Image (cartoon, rainbow, N blue to C red):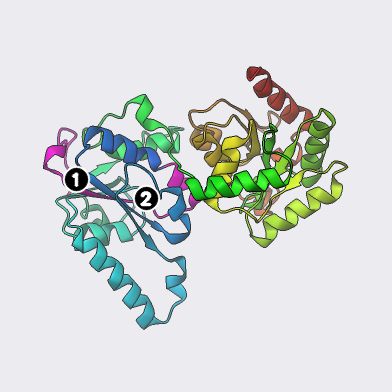
Amino acid sequence: MFTGPSDRIDLTSIRRVLVVKLRHHGDVLLASPVFSALKAHAPKVEIDALVYADTRDMLSLHPAISEVHCIGREWKSMMAGEHLAAEWRLFRQLKARNYDLLIHLTEHTRGAWLARGLGCRFAVAPNRRNKPKFWRNSFTHRYGLPLNARRHVVESNLDSLRRIGVQPALAERRLVLVPGEVAEGQVRDLLSAHGLADTPFIHLHPASRWQFKCWPVEHMAGLIDTLAARGERVVLTAAPADEERAMVRAIMARCKSAPVDLSGQLTLKALAALTDRAKLFVGVDSAPMHIAAAMGTPVVALFGPSGEAEWGPWQVSHRVVSSDAHPCRPCGIDGCGGGKVSDCLVQLPLQRVLRAVDELLAMQG
C-alpha cells in the first residue's frame, strides 16, 4: 500500500537488500550507482542483484554487490517442466537470503511477485498508475517522475533510494564497471599483437542492436579514413551478433585505411578493458557508449531518435552530436515511420562528428 513521503526507512534495521533490474546491458550498467550509493549510506548491509544472465558482467565484481542472481532469457523457450524447475531453483536461492528490502527498478511484473513471495518488510518500485491494483499494492514505497521531466536514467534509478530517505552524493552517482584481471590481460595481449601496446588509439564502436540508432556505414568509413590520414590509430569493435559484424564488414570494405578490427572478439569485460585504454571513444547510443563513460574515457556520442537528456554519457567528458535540422527528435521511434532508418542520423554530416572529436582531443593536450 502506498505511503506518504515521510516514511523513510531506517537502514540500521536492514541486513540484506535485493535490487532487481531486468533490462538490457546498458540499462543494467546505468543502475550500478544504486548499489554504490546504498552501500555508502549503509556499509553493513549486504546488497544482491537480480538481472538477466547475459547482462551479469555489467555488475559482477562491483565492490558493493555481494551476489548476482540471474534469470536466463532462454527459460521462456524451455519445456514447461524445465522452466518451472529453473524458476523454483532461483526462488529458493533468493528466499534463503532473507531480504529485508527489495528495490525494483522497472515495471516488470516479476518484481511484484518477488516482493510478496520473498516476504520483504519493505519493497520499492516505480509509481505507475496504469498498473493493476495487485502490482501497486505489492510495494510499501513507490517513486515517480515529475510530468514531462527529461531526467537521466541514472537519476531516475537513484530516485528509488531518495524515496526511502537516502540522498546520494555526487561521487556516489558514478557508473561502476570492473573489467577484472583476466579481461585486462586479454586486451593487453590483443593490443600488443596489433602493435598498439604503447600507442594511443581511438575506439570506435559503430553498431547497436537497434539499427535505427546507427550512423550510415559510408560516414563511419569516412570518419575512420580522415582520422587515419591525421595519423590516428583506430580500433573497431562490435558485438558477435550477425548484423553488427555485417555492419563492420561494410565499413571496412569502404575504408581506404586499415583500422584494427576486433569486432566479435571481445567479452563485455574485455570491451571495458579496451575502452579504458583508449584516448577517445566514438559511437552511438548503445551499451558500449555507457561502458566508455563508466571507464572515464572521453566520449563522442551520436544521437538520433533517442534522447541524450535521458541516455547521454554520464559524468564523463563528452560531446553529443545530433541533428539541428530535425525538430522532431528525440522521437523514440524505431526509424522514421518505423522503417528502421532515421533521417536525423542519415543526414548528420561527417564534419560535425569530426569537430566533436577534435574538441575532445584538444582537451587532452
User: What residue is shown with label 2?
Assistant: 106
Residue at the (63%, 50%) spot, across then down: 208
- Identify the amino acid type marked 1: Phe
Establish if 305 lies above or below 244. Answer: above
Give the label on residue 342, or none: none
Give the percent coordinates (x, y) of residue 268. 54, 51
Residue 326 in percent (x, y) is at 68, 33
Looking at the rendering, in which quadrant would you find the C terminus?
top right
Q: Residues within 10 Å of mark 2 (few under 14, many from 20)?
A: some
Foreground of the two, 113 or 286? 286
Question: Does 243 appear in magenta?
Answer: no
Query: How far across and down, in percent of the image, does residue 274 sit?
Result: 60, 42
Residue at x-position 25% and y-position 36%: 163
- Closer-to-camera residue (155/127): 155
Instruction: Answer whether residue 3 is magenta in the image.
Output: yes
> Where residue 152 sits in the image (x, y, percent)?
45, 34
Which tag is nearer the camera, tag 2 or tag 1?
Answer: 2
* 10 relative to 90, above or below: above
- Write the start and end of the magenta stretch as one range: 1-30
Q: SS for tag 2?
A: loop
- Would you say 285 lies left or right of 92 here? right
Q: CA distance from mark 2 to mark 1?
A: 17 Å
Residue ID for mark 1: 2
Which amino acid is tagged 2?
Answer: Thr
Question: Farthest residue toward the right?
Answer: 256
Q: Residues within 10 Å of mark 1 (few under 14, many from 20)?
A: some
- Image position of 354 with respect to 225: above or below: above
Q: Is residue 219 visible?
A: yes
Q: Is residue 361 left or right of residue 110?
A: right
Q: Is residue 330 visible?
A: no
